[in-house]
């Protein structure tokens, strides 16, 4: 669940680590590909997806959060 | 054996803003403009933190050139005093102009546009604005004005002496650092209180508004001697089923039952003003209730998506895109989310609290939403700056004792290797709140629940454990939630009637004698005590 980083696209700029409101990326090191330490604290706000300059982040919406719709 | 130690760092300023949402940042900007030396401490990062982190799209205000004279019913909007309400309407347009000048687009296609989120038969009072990057712009403006922003610092208690504020204590949530703020004035702007009640959405962080706002400001103010108001009058919201997110008013379709029959009279905001609709339909066997967009035009659909982007709903739009499902063709369910706490620090029109030098703004008492945060943030900044200008830094005697005690407690939680995680404690408080002080309340259940809550609360300091300062932040949030929970119980016991979502099965009627009164809870020697006040 939560944010999934495409390691091929990520340039380790650290923006997502800087801005994530719930600090899902806690423990990430400067100039390294971020680690998703606390996925269960992701608010699924899209801030990291939106602000990532490399378009490297994708949110996997957990099964418990998938919107119920009519097929 | 772990041996984590917190290093102490002291920060001095005239004014400390706790929380860097629209309220905290507007407060900081104004105080700085007035000549104060200002620091903002936010437990997250002001660029994207809090309820407005990924945007808002409507701003309550009155613009005479566009709307004409202010309609009388505007004076009835909001839950605070009449003076606060009038002050809001007098100042909101000024904030619109200020925000526009700071690069927040308050006009749409060159004009002020009032649309949506209106009440049936009443004039519009919400200005549409493209607010996705509001927080980025406010942060930039704050820095430009000379404000110092310290991100990733959670404030946990106020320092005060004899009814006068002297600063606050916090800790760095990424490094082992205790921060002691010595300031002449403090502004509380920590937003609402979520995570106290379960949201019926499967996880602690699946909340319609920011899950990191846990009533910290309310809890700190209460511990320091401020009374909290309307704490039993919890509220609920509705929105897309299972993906809890505010913004329900921006979904422009109509609600329909499973047979495609429209519920209510159409675009009259049924979902906004009657959030229990979805739950009640389900209970009566007629559910679920669908948000149906099939009748809106393509232009309306595109407009709706534009505003949903600015109202922080891109993750839901992205979900549908990835699912290969067009929500215009596929009605989706709405649900009623759990209870939350809009009541809190009932600040006055100058944003003063009963403590000299302590101010509060924005959702510390939820009223007027983001526009209220902007207006009262600015007023709090002005009040705090003028207070600081005439005050000397207090050489507060027990600061040192408080620092030592706080450091010792936090280090114990950090170094404990066996005990309760914050998740366990958070689930425990949610369970008690829902079962004993939730949608159905009664004297016997409230009494039994409060006893249980107090037993758990007493154990917390002996069992809570955190692996690092991030988890320590969550532990402190839960401690605050236990304080707020206890206060909610005490207020719910005292209000022997039913009103809004406070439903007492043993007192099912609304008592009109209480219409003009407000219930507050005060801290008397560590115990929450309820008192009634006449509404101002
Ligand atoms: C999805 C969504 C859409 C919305 N749309 C609208 C809209 O269109 N129009 C509208 O009027 N309103 C809207 N709202 C509500 C609006 O965003 C809030 O009313 C507004 O943000 C309140 O501002 P605030 O500064 O009081 O609190 P917040 O913006 O929530 O900011 C609180 C800040 O305090 C910080 N903080 C909390 N505790 C601590 C602590 N202990 N120490 C340090 N920092 C702390 C947080 O990190 C955060 O930055 C929406 C809300 C959501 C969630
Ligand atoms: S913002 Fe994007 S590119 Fe930068 S570190 Fe995060 S994932 Fe990598
Ligand atoms: S979606 Fe939001 S909460 Fe989740 S990791 Fe990204 S920035 Fe953090």
Image (cartoon, coloured by chain):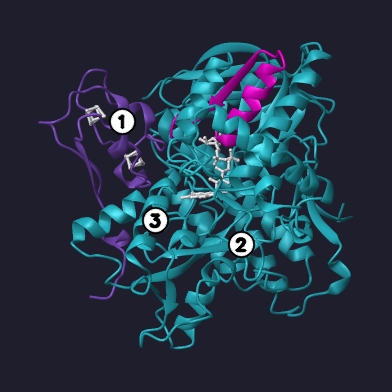
Chain colours: A purple, B cyan
- The Cα–Cα distance between marks 3 and 2, rounded to whole angstroms, is 29 Å
* Residue nearest the observer in this picture, B243 or B196: B243
* Residue nearest the observer in this picture, B415 or B337: B337
Q: Which mark is residue B240?
A: none
Tell me which segment is drawn in magenta: B21-48
In the picture provided, is B300 more to the left or to the right than B223? left
Where is mark 1, residue-wise? A16
- Measured along the vertical axis of the image, is residue B525 above or below residue B359? below
- Callout 3: few (<14), some (14-19), or many (20+) C-alpha neighbours within 10 Å? few
Where is mark 2, residue-wise? B235
Answer whether labels 3 and 2 touch (C-beta < 8 Å). Answer: no
- Measured along the vertical axis of the image, is residue B483 above or below residue B173? below
User: x and y percent of residue B111 in the render?
Assistant: 53, 44
Specify whether residue B359 is in view: yes
Q: Which mark is residue B303?
A: 3
Q: Which quadrant would residue B390 be assigned to in this image?
A: top right
Determine if the magenta segment contains residue B46: yes
- The Cα–Cα distance between marks 1 and 3, rounded to whole angstroms, is 29 Å
Q: Within 8 Å: ligand 1 and the Cβ of disc 2?
A: no
Report how many numbered discs are placed on residues in the image.
Answer: 3
Answer whether labels 1 and 3 touch (C-beta < 8 Å). Answer: no
* Chain containing mark 2: B
Q: Within 8 Å: ligand 2 and the Cβ of disc 1?
A: yes
In the picture provided, is B177 more to the left or to the right than B522? left
Answer whether labels 2 and 1 touch (C-beta < 8 Å). Answer: no
Residue displayed at 40% across by 54% down: B206
User: x and y percent of residue A38 in the render?
Assistant: 32, 40
User: x and y percent of residue B273 in the render?
Assistant: 59, 68
User: x and y percent of residue B43 in the render?
Assistant: 50, 30
């Amino acid at each position: 669940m939560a944010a999934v980083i495409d390691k091929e696209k990520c340039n380790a700029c650290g923006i997502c680590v800087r801005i994530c409101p719930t600090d899902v990326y806690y423990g990430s090191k400067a100039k390294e590909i971020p680690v998703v330490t606390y996925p269960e604290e992701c608010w699924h706000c899209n801030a990291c997806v939106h602000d990532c300059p490399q378009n490297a982040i994708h949110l996997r919406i957990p099964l418990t959060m998938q919107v119920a719709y009519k097929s | 054996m772990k041996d984590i130690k917190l290093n102490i760092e002291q920060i001095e300023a005239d004014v400390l803003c706790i929380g860097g949402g629209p309220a905290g940042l507007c407060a900081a900007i104004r105080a700085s403009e007035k000549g104060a030396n200002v620091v903002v401490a936010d437990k997250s990062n002001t660029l994207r933190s809090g309820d407005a982190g990924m945007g808002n799209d409507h701003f309550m205000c009155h613009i005479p050139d566009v709307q004409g004279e202010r309609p009388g019913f505007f004076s009835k909007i909001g839950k605070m005093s009449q003076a606060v309400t009038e002050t809001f309407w007098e100042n909101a347009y000024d904030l619109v102009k200020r925000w526009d000048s700071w690069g927040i687009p308050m006009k749409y296609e060159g004009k002020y546009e009032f649309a949506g989120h209106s009440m049936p038969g009443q004039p519009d009072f919400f200005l549409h604005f493209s607010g996705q990057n509001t927080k980025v712009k406010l942060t930039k403006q704050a820095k430009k004005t000379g404000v110092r922003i310290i991100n990733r610092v959670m404030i946990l208690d106020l320092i005060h002496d004899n009814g006068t504020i002297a600063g606050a204590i916090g800790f760095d949530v990424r490094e082992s650092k205790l921060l002691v703020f010595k300031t002449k004035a403090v502004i509380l702007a920590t937003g609402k209180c979520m995570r106290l009640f379960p949201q019926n959405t499967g996880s602690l962080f699946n909340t319609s508004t920011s899950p990191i706002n846990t009533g910290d400001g309310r809890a700190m103010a209460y511990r320091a001697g401020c009374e909290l108001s309307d704490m039993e009058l919890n509220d609920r919201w509705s929105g897309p089923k299972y993906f809890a997110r505010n913004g329900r008013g921006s979904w422009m379709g109509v609600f329909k039952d499973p047979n495609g029959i429209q519920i209510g009279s159409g675009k009259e905001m049924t979902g906004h003003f009657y959030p229990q609709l979805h739950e009640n339909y389900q209970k009566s066997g007629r559910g679920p209730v669908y948000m149906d967009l099939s009748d809106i035009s393509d232009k309306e659909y595109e407009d709706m998506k534009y505003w949903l982007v600015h109202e922080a709903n891109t993750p839901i739009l992205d979900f549908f895109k990835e699912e290969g499902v067009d929500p215009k063709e596929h009605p989706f369910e709405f649900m009623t989310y759990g209870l939350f706490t809009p009541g809190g620090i009932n600040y006055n029109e100058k944003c003063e609290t009963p403590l000299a030098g302590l101010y509060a703004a924005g959702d510390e008492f939820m009223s007027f939403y983001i526009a209220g945060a902007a207006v009262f943030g600015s007023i709090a900044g002005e009040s705090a700056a003028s207070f600081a200008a005439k005050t000397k830094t207090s050489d507060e005697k027990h600061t040192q004792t408080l620092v030592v005690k706080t450091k010792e407690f936090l280090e114990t939680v950090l170094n404990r290797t066996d005990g309760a995680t914050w998740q366990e404690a958070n689930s425990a408080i949610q369970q008690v709140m829902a079962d004993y002080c939730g949608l159905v309340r009664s004297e016997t259940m409230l009494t039994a629940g409060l006893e249980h809550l107090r037993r758990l609360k007493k154990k917390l300091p002996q069992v809570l454990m955190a692996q690092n300062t991030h988890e320590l932040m969550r532990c402190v949030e839960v401690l605050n939630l236990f304080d707020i929970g206890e206060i909610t119980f005490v207020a719910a016991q005292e209000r022997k009637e039913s009103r809004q979502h406070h439903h007492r099965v043993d007192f099912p009627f609304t008592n009109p004698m209480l219409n003009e009164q407000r219930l507050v809870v005060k801290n008397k020697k560590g115990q929450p005590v309820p008192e009634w006040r006449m509404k101002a």
